[in-house]
Image (cartoon, rainbow, N blue to C red):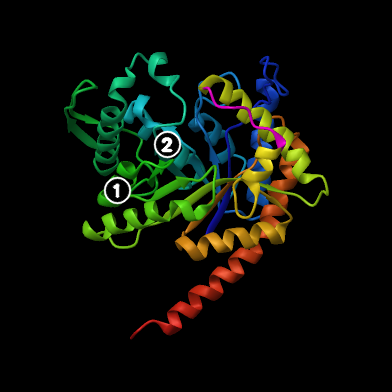
Amino acid sequence: MELGVVTFADNGSDYEGNALFSGEERMKNLIEEAELADQVGLDVFGVGEHHRPDFTVSSPTVALAAIAARTKNIRLTSAVTVLSSADPVRVYEEFATVDLISGGRAEVMAGRGSFTETFPLFGQSLDDYDELFIEHLELLLKIRENEYVTWEGKHRPSIDNRGVFPRAVQEPLPVWIAVGGSPESVARAGLMGLPLAIAIIGGTPDRFAPLVELYRRASEQAGHGELPLGINSHVFVSESPTMRDDYYEYYSATMNKIGRERGWPPMDRAGFNARIAGDGIPWIGEPEAIAEKILREHELFGNSRFLAQGSMGRMPHDVALRSIELFGTKVAPIVREEVARREAGSAQTAPA
Protein backbone atom coordinates (compact mmCIF):
# COMPACT_ATOMS: atom_id res chain seq x y z
CA MET A 1 0.00 0.00 0.00
CA GLU A 2 1.25 3.47 -0.89
CA LEU A 3 1.56 5.89 2.01
CA GLY A 4 1.98 9.63 1.77
CA VAL A 5 1.03 13.07 2.98
CA VAL A 6 -0.99 15.92 1.57
CA THR A 7 -1.24 19.56 2.53
CA PHE A 8 -3.37 22.55 1.65
CA ALA A 9 -0.43 24.80 2.59
CA ASP A 10 -2.47 26.58 5.28
CA ASN A 11 -0.90 29.90 6.20
CA GLY A 12 -2.37 29.85 9.71
CA SER A 13 -4.94 32.62 9.31
CA ASP A 14 -7.00 33.40 12.39
CA TYR A 15 -10.57 34.71 12.52
CA GLU A 16 -9.40 38.22 11.69
CA GLY A 17 -7.28 37.06 8.78
CA ASN A 18 -3.91 37.45 10.48
CA ALA A 19 -1.59 34.81 9.02
CA LEU A 20 1.01 32.89 11.01
CA PHE A 21 3.19 32.51 7.89
CA SER A 22 3.85 34.90 5.04
CA GLY A 23 3.37 33.51 1.55
CA GLU A 24 7.12 33.25 1.11
CA GLU A 25 7.57 31.45 4.44
CA ARG A 26 4.76 29.01 3.75
CA MET A 27 6.13 28.11 0.34
CA LYS A 28 9.56 27.50 1.85
CA ASN A 29 7.95 25.31 4.52
CA LEU A 30 5.98 23.41 1.88
CA ILE A 31 9.12 22.45 -0.01
CA GLU A 32 10.80 21.36 3.23
CA GLU A 33 7.81 19.16 4.07
CA ALA A 34 8.05 17.49 0.66
CA GLU A 35 11.81 17.00 0.94
CA LEU A 36 11.39 15.35 4.33
CA ALA A 37 8.57 13.11 3.08
CA ASP A 38 10.89 11.96 0.28
CA GLN A 39 13.82 11.42 2.64
CA VAL A 40 11.83 9.25 5.08
CA GLY A 41 10.64 7.02 2.25
CA LEU A 42 7.00 8.00 1.83
CA ASP A 43 5.43 7.23 -1.53
CA VAL A 44 3.29 10.26 -2.33
CA PHE A 45 3.22 14.00 -1.64
CA GLY A 46 0.11 16.00 -2.52
CA VAL A 47 -0.63 19.73 -2.70
CA GLY A 48 -4.12 21.22 -2.75
CA GLU A 49 -5.46 24.02 -4.95
CA HIS A 50 -7.30 26.92 -3.31
CA HIS A 51 -8.03 30.52 -4.21
CA ARG A 52 -8.56 31.84 -0.70
CA PRO A 53 -6.54 34.01 1.70
CA ASP A 54 -6.04 31.20 4.23
CA PHE A 55 -4.20 28.85 1.82
CA THR A 56 -1.00 29.64 -0.05
CA VAL A 57 -1.14 27.44 -3.17
CA SER A 58 -3.45 28.37 -6.05
CA SER A 59 -1.29 26.60 -8.64
CA PRO A 60 -0.29 23.10 -7.49
CA THR A 61 1.72 22.42 -10.63
CA VAL A 62 4.07 25.34 -9.97
CA ALA A 63 4.63 24.13 -6.40
CA LEU A 64 5.03 20.52 -7.54
CA ALA A 65 7.57 21.54 -10.18
CA ALA A 66 9.69 23.20 -7.48
CA ILE A 67 9.31 20.10 -5.31
CA ALA A 68 10.18 17.83 -8.24
CA ALA A 69 13.55 19.52 -8.56
CA ARG A 70 14.29 18.94 -4.86
CA THR A 71 13.13 15.32 -4.48
CA LYS A 72 14.14 11.99 -5.97
CA ASN A 73 11.56 9.25 -5.52
CA ILE A 74 8.27 10.48 -4.12
CA ARG A 75 5.22 10.68 -6.40
CA LEU A 76 3.78 14.18 -6.82
CA THR A 77 0.05 14.79 -7.01
CA SER A 78 -2.47 17.57 -6.73
CA ALA A 79 -4.97 17.18 -3.94
CA VAL A 80 -6.98 18.32 -5.76
CA THR A 81 -6.91 20.06 -9.13
CA VAL A 82 -10.24 21.89 -9.34
CA LEU A 83 -11.02 20.57 -12.79
CA SER A 84 -14.46 22.18 -13.09
CA SER A 85 -12.89 25.64 -13.39
CA ALA A 86 -9.62 24.68 -15.09
CA ASP A 87 -8.79 24.43 -18.79
CA PRO A 88 -8.03 20.74 -19.46
CA VAL A 89 -5.46 21.65 -22.09
CA ARG A 90 -3.45 23.66 -19.58
CA VAL A 91 -3.95 21.01 -16.90
CA TYR A 92 -2.40 18.35 -19.13
CA GLU A 93 0.42 20.60 -20.35
CA GLU A 94 1.37 21.69 -16.83
CA PHE A 95 1.29 18.21 -15.33
CA ALA A 96 3.21 16.83 -18.30
CA THR A 97 5.85 19.47 -17.56
CA VAL A 98 6.02 18.36 -13.91
CA ASP A 99 6.28 14.78 -15.16
CA LEU A 100 9.27 15.69 -17.31
CA ILE A 101 11.00 17.55 -14.47
CA SER A 102 10.38 14.72 -12.01
CA GLY A 103 11.26 11.85 -14.33
CA GLY A 104 7.76 10.41 -14.45
CA ARG A 105 6.46 11.04 -10.91
CA ALA A 106 3.50 13.35 -11.57
CA GLU A 107 -0.19 12.60 -11.39
CA VAL A 108 -3.46 14.53 -11.45
CA MET A 109 -6.01 14.16 -8.68
CA ALA A 110 -9.07 15.77 -10.26
CA GLY A 111 -11.99 16.97 -8.19
CA ARG A 112 -14.59 19.67 -7.89
CA GLY A 113 -13.13 21.11 -4.70
CA SER A 114 -14.84 21.92 -1.42
CA PHE A 115 -14.95 25.68 -2.03
CA THR A 116 -16.66 27.65 -4.78
CA GLU A 117 -14.44 30.76 -5.19
CA THR A 118 -13.05 29.52 -8.50
CA PHE A 119 -16.36 29.79 -10.34
CA PRO A 120 -16.89 33.57 -10.14
CA LEU A 121 -13.12 34.12 -10.25
CA PHE A 122 -12.86 32.43 -13.65
CA GLY A 123 -16.19 33.65 -14.99
CA GLN A 124 -18.15 30.42 -14.61
CA SER A 125 -21.55 29.67 -13.16
CA LEU A 126 -22.22 27.36 -10.24
CA ASP A 127 -25.31 26.26 -12.14
CA ASP A 128 -22.91 24.40 -14.45
CA TYR A 129 -21.06 22.70 -11.56
CA ASP A 130 -21.60 19.11 -12.72
CA GLU A 131 -21.55 19.74 -16.47
CA LEU A 132 -18.22 21.55 -16.28
CA PHE A 133 -16.53 18.75 -14.36
CA ILE A 134 -17.79 16.00 -16.64
CA GLU A 135 -16.93 17.88 -19.83
CA HIS A 136 -13.47 18.90 -18.63
CA LEU A 137 -12.71 15.37 -17.42
CA GLU A 138 -13.67 13.87 -20.77
CA LEU A 139 -11.44 16.35 -22.60
CA LEU A 140 -8.51 15.78 -20.23
CA LEU A 141 -8.70 12.04 -20.78
CA LYS A 142 -8.87 12.52 -24.55
CA ILE A 143 -5.80 14.76 -24.46
CA ARG A 144 -3.74 12.28 -22.48
CA GLU A 145 -4.50 9.59 -25.08
CA ASN A 146 -3.91 11.72 -28.19
CA GLU A 147 -1.22 14.21 -29.18
CA TYR A 148 -3.58 15.84 -31.65
CA VAL A 149 -7.12 16.48 -30.51
CA THR A 150 -10.39 17.30 -32.21
CA TRP A 151 -13.12 18.10 -29.71
CA GLU A 152 -16.33 20.03 -29.30
CA GLY A 153 -18.25 20.71 -26.10
CA LYS A 154 -20.69 23.11 -24.51
CA HIS A 155 -18.55 25.15 -22.13
CA ARG A 156 -15.22 25.50 -23.93
CA PRO A 157 -14.26 26.57 -27.46
CA SER A 158 -13.84 23.64 -29.83
CA ILE A 159 -10.47 22.19 -30.83
CA ASP A 160 -9.78 21.28 -34.44
CA ASN A 161 -6.91 18.80 -34.75
CA ARG A 162 -4.53 20.75 -32.54
CA GLY A 163 -1.48 19.32 -30.82
CA VAL A 164 -1.09 19.42 -27.04
CA PHE A 165 2.53 19.50 -25.88
CA PRO A 166 4.75 18.58 -24.15
CA ARG A 167 3.81 14.96 -23.66
CA ALA A 168 4.23 13.28 -20.28
CA VAL A 169 6.89 10.67 -19.56
CA GLN A 170 4.19 8.32 -18.27
CA GLU A 171 1.81 6.84 -20.80
CA PRO A 172 -0.81 7.52 -19.77
CA LEU A 173 -0.34 10.30 -17.23
CA PRO A 174 -2.19 9.04 -14.11
CA VAL A 175 -5.51 10.74 -13.45
CA TRP A 176 -7.35 10.02 -10.20
CA ILE A 177 -10.88 11.13 -9.33
CA ALA A 178 -11.16 12.67 -5.86
CA VAL A 179 -14.53 12.73 -4.11
CA GLY A 180 -15.92 13.72 -0.76
CA GLY A 181 -18.97 11.49 -0.73
CA SER A 182 -20.98 11.87 -3.94
CA PRO A 183 -22.34 8.48 -5.09
CA GLU A 184 -22.66 9.77 -8.65
CA SER A 185 -18.97 10.73 -8.78
CA VAL A 186 -17.93 7.42 -7.24
CA ALA A 187 -19.93 5.41 -9.78
CA ARG A 188 -18.60 7.54 -12.64
CA ALA A 189 -15.01 6.84 -11.65
CA GLY A 190 -15.68 3.11 -11.59
CA LEU A 191 -17.47 3.11 -14.93
CA MET A 192 -14.64 5.12 -16.52
CA GLY A 193 -11.96 2.85 -15.06
CA LEU A 194 -10.24 5.61 -13.10
CA PRO A 195 -8.52 5.36 -9.70
CA LEU A 196 -10.58 6.84 -6.87
CA ALA A 197 -9.49 8.90 -3.86
CA ILE A 198 -12.07 9.37 -1.10
CA ALA A 199 -11.60 12.22 1.35
CA ILE A 200 -12.79 11.03 4.77
CA ILE A 201 -12.50 14.16 6.87
CA GLY A 202 -15.11 13.38 9.51
CA GLY A 203 -16.91 10.46 11.09
CA THR A 204 -15.58 6.91 11.00
CA PRO A 205 -14.33 5.01 7.93
CA ASP A 206 -17.08 2.38 8.04
CA ARG A 207 -19.61 5.03 7.00
CA PHE A 208 -17.93 5.08 3.59
CA ALA A 209 -18.12 1.33 2.96
CA PRO A 210 -21.22 1.70 0.71
CA LEU A 211 -19.33 4.15 -1.52
CA VAL A 212 -16.40 1.77 -1.90
CA GLU A 213 -18.79 -1.05 -2.71
CA LEU A 214 -20.54 1.12 -5.31
CA TYR A 215 -17.20 2.03 -6.90
CA ARG A 216 -16.06 -1.56 -7.19
CA ARG A 217 -19.42 -2.74 -8.47
CA ALA A 218 -19.42 -0.05 -11.18
CA SER A 219 -15.86 -0.96 -12.17
CA GLU A 220 -16.71 -4.64 -12.41
CA GLN A 221 -19.85 -3.99 -14.46
CA ALA A 222 -17.83 -1.87 -16.89
CA GLY A 223 -15.21 -4.62 -17.24
CA HIS A 224 -12.35 -2.75 -15.57
CA GLY A 225 -11.73 -5.13 -12.69
CA GLU A 226 -9.87 -4.02 -9.56
CA LEU A 227 -8.85 -0.35 -9.61
CA PRO A 228 -6.60 1.63 -7.24
CA LEU A 229 -8.43 3.09 -4.24
CA GLY A 230 -7.00 5.79 -2.01
CA ILE A 231 -8.19 7.33 1.25
CA ASN A 232 -7.25 10.85 2.37
CA SER A 233 -7.78 11.90 6.01
CA HIS A 234 -6.54 14.34 8.65
CA VAL A 235 -3.78 12.72 10.70
CA PHE A 236 -1.49 14.04 13.42
CA VAL A 237 1.31 11.75 14.55
CA SER A 238 2.95 12.84 17.79
CA GLU A 239 4.68 11.53 20.89
CA SER A 240 3.77 14.57 22.98
CA PRO A 241 1.52 14.07 26.03
CA THR A 242 -0.34 17.24 24.98
CA MET A 243 -0.97 16.11 21.37
CA ARG A 244 -4.77 16.28 21.60
CA ASP A 245 -4.75 19.69 23.25
CA ASP A 246 -2.30 20.96 20.65
CA TYR A 247 -4.20 19.61 17.69
CA TYR A 248 -7.49 20.92 19.02
CA GLU A 249 -6.05 24.44 18.84
CA TYR A 250 -4.89 23.99 15.23
CA TYR A 251 -7.97 22.12 14.02
CA SER A 252 -10.80 23.94 15.77
CA ALA A 253 -9.57 27.37 14.74
CA THR A 254 -9.47 26.32 11.08
CA MET A 255 -12.78 24.46 11.10
CA ASN A 256 -14.57 27.23 13.00
CA LYS A 257 -13.26 29.84 10.60
CA ILE A 258 -14.69 27.89 7.66
CA GLY A 259 -17.80 27.11 9.70
CA ARG A 260 -18.54 30.79 10.16
CA GLU A 261 -18.69 31.15 6.38
CA ARG A 262 -20.99 28.16 5.99
CA GLY A 263 -23.24 28.67 8.97
CA TRP A 264 -22.02 25.66 10.96
CA PRO A 265 -22.29 25.69 14.74
CA PRO A 266 -18.93 26.33 16.42
CA MET A 267 -16.84 23.36 17.53
CA ASP A 268 -15.99 23.26 21.23
CA ARG A 269 -13.71 20.85 23.06
CA ALA A 270 -16.54 18.46 23.91
CA GLY A 271 -17.54 18.29 20.25
CA PHE A 272 -13.94 17.73 19.24
CA ASN A 273 -13.52 14.92 21.77
CA ALA A 274 -16.66 13.25 20.44
CA ARG A 275 -15.39 13.59 16.88
CA ILE A 276 -12.06 11.86 17.54
CA ALA A 277 -13.44 9.06 19.75
CA GLY A 278 -12.63 5.55 18.56
CA ASP A 279 -11.65 5.67 14.89
CA GLY A 280 -13.28 9.06 14.39
CA ILE A 281 -11.36 11.41 12.13
CA PRO A 282 -9.09 13.34 12.59
CA TRP A 283 -6.73 10.66 13.84
CA ILE A 284 -4.38 11.84 16.59
CA GLY A 285 -1.93 9.53 18.27
CA GLU A 286 1.45 7.94 18.70
CA PRO A 287 2.86 6.02 15.71
CA GLU A 288 1.61 2.60 16.81
CA ALA A 289 -1.93 3.88 17.36
CA ILE A 290 -2.04 5.58 13.96
CA ALA A 291 -0.70 2.45 12.27
CA GLU A 292 -3.45 0.38 13.90
CA LYS A 293 -6.12 2.76 12.60
CA ILE A 294 -4.72 2.66 9.05
CA LEU A 295 -4.61 -1.13 9.17
CA ARG A 296 -8.19 -1.41 10.43
CA GLU A 297 -9.24 0.82 7.55
CA HIS A 298 -7.25 -1.29 5.11
CA GLU A 299 -8.98 -4.40 6.40
CA LEU A 300 -12.31 -2.68 5.76
CA PHE A 301 -11.59 -1.32 2.28
CA GLY A 302 -8.54 -3.11 0.89
CA ASN A 303 -7.35 0.31 -0.25
CA SER A 304 -4.09 0.61 -2.15
CA ARG A 305 -3.17 4.11 -0.89
CA PHE A 306 -3.51 6.16 2.28
CA LEU A 307 -2.63 9.86 2.39
CA ALA A 308 -2.44 11.76 5.67
CA GLN A 309 -3.31 15.45 5.61
CA GLY A 310 -0.73 16.72 8.01
CA SER A 311 -0.07 20.44 8.43
CA MET A 312 -3.24 22.11 9.67
CA GLY A 313 -4.09 25.74 10.38
CA ARG A 314 -1.69 27.40 12.79
CA MET A 315 0.41 24.27 13.36
CA PRO A 316 4.06 25.32 13.81
CA HIS A 317 6.39 24.21 11.05
CA ASP A 318 8.59 22.09 13.31
CA VAL A 319 5.53 20.25 14.62
CA ALA A 320 4.34 19.51 11.07
CA LEU A 321 7.79 18.23 10.13
CA ARG A 322 7.93 15.96 13.17
CA SER A 323 4.54 14.46 12.30
CA ILE A 324 5.78 13.69 8.77
CA GLU A 325 9.00 12.20 10.15
CA LEU A 326 7.11 9.91 12.54
CA PHE A 327 4.68 8.91 9.81
CA GLY A 328 7.51 7.90 7.49
CA THR A 329 9.92 6.31 9.97
CA LYS A 330 7.56 4.65 12.45
CA VAL A 331 4.01 4.38 11.07
CA ALA A 332 4.88 3.36 7.51
CA PRO A 333 7.11 0.35 8.41
CA ILE A 334 4.40 -1.13 10.64
CA VAL A 335 1.72 -0.69 8.00
CA ARG A 336 3.83 -1.98 5.13
CA GLU A 337 4.92 -5.09 7.00
CA GLU A 338 1.38 -6.02 8.01
CA VAL A 339 -0.13 -5.31 4.56
CA ALA A 340 2.60 -7.45 2.96
CA ARG A 341 1.80 -10.24 5.42
CA ARG A 342 -1.90 -10.02 4.58
CA GLU A 343 -1.26 -10.06 0.86
CA ALA A 344 1.05 -13.06 1.16
CA GLY A 345 -1.61 -14.89 3.13
CA SER A 346 -4.27 -14.08 0.57
CA ALA A 347 -2.04 -15.35 -2.24
CA GLN A 348 -1.49 -18.65 -0.43
CA THR A 349 -5.22 -19.21 0.15
CA ALA A 350 -6.36 -18.15 -3.33
CA PRO A 351 -7.81 -20.98 -5.48
CA ALA A 352 -5.51 -22.32 -8.18
Q: Which amino acid lies under the numbered mark 2 shown in the image of this protein?
A: Phe
Q: Main secondary structure of the magenta part?
A: loop
Vertical relation: 208 (above or below) 262: below
Q: Residue furthest bottom?
A: 352
User: Is 304 covered by the magenta stretch?
Assistant: no
Neighbourhood count class around disc 1 (C-alpha, 10 Å): few under 14, some 14–19, many 20 upward: many
Q: Given this view, does label 2 or label 1 mark the residue nearer the observer?
A: 1
Q: Position of residue 242 (x, y in %)?
A: 82, 45
Q: Position of residue 253 (x, y in %)?
A: 68, 28
Q: Dot 2 corresponds to which residue?
A: 95
Mark 2 and mark 1: span between their CA atoms?
25 Å
Point 29% across, 21% down: residue? 127
Q: Which residues are magenta?
A: 263-269
Determine whether label 2 and label 1 are within 8 Å by CB: no
Point 62% across, 44% down: residue? 275
Q: Secondary structure at mark 1?
A: helix
Q: Which amino acid lies under the numbered mark 1 shown in the image of this protein?
A: Ala
Q: Secondary structure at mark 2?
A: helix
Mark found first going from the N terminus, 2 or 1: 2
Relative to 293, 162 lies left or right: left
**Quarter where residue 150 is shown:** top left
Q: Dot 1 corresponds to which residue?
A: 187
Vertical relation: 151 (above or below) 215: above
Q: Position of residue 310 (x, y in %)?
A: 64, 42
